[in-house]
Image (spheres, rainbow, N blue to C red):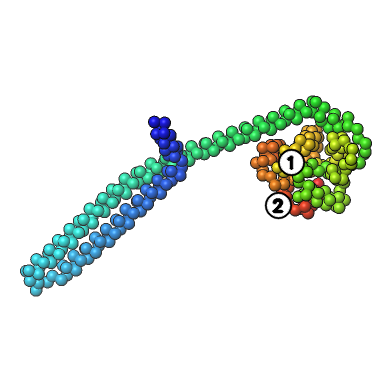
Amino acid sequence: MGGNMDVVQRAEKTKMNPSYYQNQINKIEKDIADFQKKIADESKKENEKNKQICSVNRSINKSTSVSTLQSKNRQIQGYQTDIYNCKKKIAEYQKKIADKSIELGKKKQDLRNSEDTEIKKQNKQQEDFQRSLQRKIDEQKTQLDILIHQNYSSQTTFENVEVKENKRYDFFISHASEDKDDIVRSLAGSLKENGFEVWYDEFELKIGDSLRKKIDVGLTNSRFGIVIISPSFVKKNWTEYELNGMVAREMNGHKVILPICHKISKDEVLKFSPTLADKMALNTPIHSTKDIIKALKEL
């Protein structure tokens, strides 16, 4: 019994689909076209029979014998019977066309209703998505507010860091170690060759250094933070720590974060951080290191 109910529910759901009604409309229009062709064929036959009657009538003259005249009359009667059958079929096809036209009108109305329902459904899905996205953004803002009130902002946390050097940097590169060979090392080197001061761990960290303190120094003393967003990046704790530090600075009104997407989709970035997904980003499959350097020079 449950299986039968499922079949019925699936059938009802299919009927709500615009493509279901469009297929029915296409079939009805084809049927009407077929009937119209049949009417044309029967009309052609009728014309031919009328011509044959005219031809027989022209062949009758004063010298036509009685037996021949009777034979020709039988011919004419046969043609007239054929004409009657043609007219009868034409009338039947015309009635079928009229019935199909009424059915076609109903199906077109069903299609319009189904399309309206589908549009409303899509609008609702879009609204639900927007609400879900807004909730995620609000949640992240709440988390950032908590971090700021816990002395995580640049005005508190970074002021308490023991900054042992006053060196200023143009860019801080936040990345996952798995991406060094693919993009990070070559980008850092190219930036340095182009005269930029770059905080990059292979340039700045020495044995025995405090990783947290060094990162805080780099974040505090850098104008911008280049974030290499990749599948590896979104899984790391340290990269999240660095990103949170940049976000905290942006909360104070400074443009800091410069995202570069590397082997990651827009949806994956959106899932990781809606606010980060909202930023205009460069993309390594599209932009070469040379393109990235050119874009950074324009800042």
Q: Residues within 10 Å of mark 1 (few under 14, many from 20)?
A: many
When the figure is inspected, residue 157 is found, relative to residue 229, above or below; the finding is above
Q: Residue furthest left?
A: 66
Precedes in sequence: disc 2 or disc 1:
1
Q: Residue at (32%, 53%) from the top-left corner?
A: 35
Q: Residue at (33%, 46%) from the top-left corner?
A: 100
When the figure is inspected, residue 19 is found, relative to residue 61, above or below; the finding is above
Indicate the quadrant where residue 76 lies. Answer: bottom left
Whole-angstrom CA distance, mark 2 to mark 1, is 19 Å
When the figure is inspected, residue 103 is found, relative to residue 154, above or below; the finding is below
Q: Amino acid at mark 2?
A: Ile
**Between 58 and 112, the one nearer to me in the picture:** 112
The spot of residue 210 in percent (x, y) is 87, 35
Q: Residue at (92%, 39%) from the top-left corner?
A: 166
Q: Amino acid at mark 1?
A: Phe
Residue named by callout 1: 233
Location of the N terminus by quadrant is: top left
Q: Is residue 165 left or right of residue 267?
A: right
Q: Residue at (86%, 39%) from the top-left corner?
A: 218
**Secondary structure beneath disc 2?**
loop
**Secondary structure beneath disc 1?**
helix
When the figure is inspected, residue 209 is found, relative to residue 68, above or below; the finding is above
Q: Is residue 105 left or right of residue 73?
A: right
Residue named by callout 2: 286
Indicate the quadrant where residue 10 lies. Answer: top left
Residue 243 in view of the camera = no
